[in-house]
Image (spheres, helix red, strand yellow):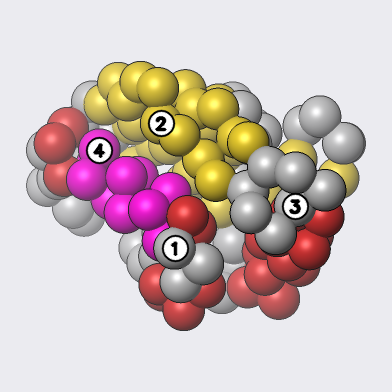
Amino acid sequence: MTDGFRSCSPEWEIGGDHGSAAFTASKEDHMLTAQDNATIVRAHYDAFNRRDLDKNLSLVTEDVKWMNIPFNVNYSGRKGYREFIDNWTTAMPDCKVEIVNVVAGDTWTAVEFVGRGTP
């Protein structure tokens, strides 16, 4: 999947389309296990569901890039990433993401999820 957002480490490239997401990381600088990667991904979606924007923003770097594939819109930087989240939570204040499946490797993670909310 194309570029998405990055976690605290510039080596963690994370991408998503608010329906599925693919996460990759460089193994050279960080020896994370598949379980570590899955845990970080789950923490991100958990923070979104709790509307803990500070936690969400702490999991991305300043040069975060998020591609919203269904709407063909790209967001850059923490300000852009916050705009992305604000768009979803303004349009559907009660929206939640339910993780259906997480498949993780040592340098990548794929997430299948269902997003629900009412306008």
Task: Specify start and end residues of the magenta stretch as a single range.
Answer: 37-47
Mark 2 lies on a secondary structure that is strand
When the figure is inspected, residue 7 is found, relative to residue 119, above or below; the finding is below
> In 3D space, how far apart are the residues under numbered discs 1 and 4 (Cα atoms)?
18 Å
Check contact, mark 1 vs mark 2: CB within 8 A: no
* Residue displayed at 81% across by 29% down: 70
Q: Which residue is mark 1?
A: 50
Residue type at the position of mark 1:
Arg
Residue bearing the label numbered 4: 38
96 relative to 111, above or below: below
Q: Position of residue 60 (x, y in %)?
A: 47, 65
Q: Residues within 10 Å of mark 3 (few under 14, many from 20)?
A: some
Residue that appears at 38% across and 53% down: 46
Earlier sequence position, callout 3 versus callout 1 = 1
Q: Nearer the viewer, residue 7 or 68?
A: 68
Q: CA distance from mark 1 to mark 2?
A: 14 Å
Q: CA distance from mark 2 to mark 4?
A: 11 Å
Q: Is residue 11 visible?
A: no
Between 38 and 90, the one lying in front of the other is: 90
- Which residue shows up at 51% across the image and 67% down it? 51
Identify which amino acid the numbered label 4 is placed on. Ala
Q: Is residue 72 above or below residue 74?
A: above
Q: Earlier in the sequence, mark 2 or mark 4?
A: 4
- Check disc 2 and give the amino acid type: Ile
The residue carrying mark 2 is: 99
For mark 3, what is the residue? 92
Q: What is the CA distance from the residue labelled 3 to the residue labelled 1?
A: 14 Å
